[in-house]
Image: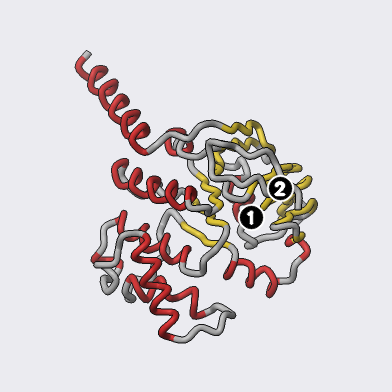
């Protein structure tokens, strides 16, 4: 298996997990062709925490859909653990989504009439693993314990705060024990304090070995990652590895920004 240079600032092992070669995605609407991705070349190591940034229309969502096996590229290759998943059938892609990839969304996407525990159990009901109800309950309870919600298992989404709902969504993403977590604007609907709590959890999961790719429009949140990939017009414009900021350092940045705003208003 090929490897890349290990970044000491991240949990990356050096083993290549994701390789994109000349990835293109073209959407056709009658006679019009819209090129969302224009030859993306990327390699990500197992255990890496990468943030993807870019303006609206830069290709972030398209890239995440392909990485999550929700869409196929028009051209190029997407190798996941050495397998070219861009050639897989729908059933094969569904199995990868169910077993290898966890998804976290900005809007949580929780079922409103079911408890936190039942929401987390849901992916296991569609799993090809021969799990008993006892095993399903146990894994869902463990996932909620990991995100600190062992005392909220029977609460419905409306009875939870926004941060707690996002924790349930993260537990749901973790319950299938994926190796890759895709987080699309995970702090987008949260205030800064709760958002940092979610980032703290994501960093902890990465330190424990989970590979994480996060889309964000917030530069400060992106600095929690050990790598920032910036897209523009379907191309990789910048690809930087850097020492990630801790949640404490990010909180200090927020406090400094607040002081600057207050000083400007006083002037």
Q: Of label 1 and label 2, which has the lower sequence position? A: 2
Residue 249 or residue 40, whichever sits in front: 249
Residue 69 or residue 33, whichever sits in front: 69
Of discs 1 and 2, which sits in the foreground? 1
Q: Residue at x 28, y 29 (%)?
A: 255
Q: Which residue is outermost to the left?
A: 266
Q: Residue at x 50, y 51 (%)?
A: 184
239 over 99 or under it: above or below: above
Q: Is residue 221 left or right of residue 73?
A: left
Alpha-carbon span between mark 1 and mark 2: 19 Å
Q: Is residue 85 left or right of residue 166?
A: right
Image location of residue 263, percent across then percent down: 24, 18
**Residue 209 seen anywhere in this rendered image of the structure:** yes
Number of on-image labels: 2
68 over 229 or under it: above or below: below
Would you call the spot at circle 1 few (<14 residues within 10 Å), some (14-19), or many (20 or more)? many
Local secondary structure at mark 2: strand
What numbered label is drawn on residue 30?
A: none
Q: Residue at x 32, y 34 (%)?
A: 251
- Label 1, on which residue? 67
Q: Is residue 35 left or right of residue 247?
A: right
Q: Residue at x 48, y 38 (%)?
A: 222
- Label 2, on which residue? 34
**Residue 55 seen anywhere in this rendered image of the structure:** no
Residue 22 or residue 152, whichever sits in front: 152
83 over 234 or under it: above or below: below
Local secondary structure at mark 1: helix
Image location of residue 10, percent across then percent down: 53, 41
Would you call the spot at circle 2 few (<14 residues within 10 Å), some (14-19), or many (20 or more)? few
């Amino acid at each position: 298996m090929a490897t890349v240079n290990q970044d000491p600032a991240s949990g990356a092992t050096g083993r290549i997990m994701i390789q994109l070669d000349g990835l293109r995605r073209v959407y056709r609407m009658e006679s019009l062709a819209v090129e969302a991705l224009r030859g993306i070349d990327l390699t990500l190591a197992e255990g890496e925490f990468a943030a993807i940034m870019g303006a609206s229309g830069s290709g972030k969502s398209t890239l995440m859909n392909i990485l999550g096996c929700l869409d196929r590229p028009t051209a190029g290759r997407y190798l996941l653990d050495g397998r070219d998943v861009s050639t897989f059938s729908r059933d094969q892609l569904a199995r990868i989504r169910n077993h290898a990839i966890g998804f976290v969304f900005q809007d949580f996407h929780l079922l409103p009439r079911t408890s936190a525990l039942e929401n987390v159990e849901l992916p296991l009901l569609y799993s090809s693993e021969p799990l008993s109800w006892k095993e399903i309950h146990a894994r869902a309870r463990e996932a909620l314990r990991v995100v600190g919600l062992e005392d909220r298992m029977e609460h419905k989404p409306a009875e939870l705060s926004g941060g707690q709902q996002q924790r349930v969504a993260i537990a749901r993403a973790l319950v299938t024990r994926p190796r890759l977590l895709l987080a699309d604007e995970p702090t987008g609907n949260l205030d800064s304090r709760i958002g940092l709590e979610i980032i703290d959890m994501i960093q902890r999961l990465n330190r424990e070995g989970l590979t994480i790719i996060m889309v964000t429009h917030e530069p400060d949140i992106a600095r929690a990652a050990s790598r920032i990939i910036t897209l523009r017009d379907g191309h990789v414009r910048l690809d930087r590895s850097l020492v990630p900021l801790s949640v404490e350092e990010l909180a200090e940045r927020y406090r400094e920004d607040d002081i600057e705003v207050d000083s400007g208003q006083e002037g």
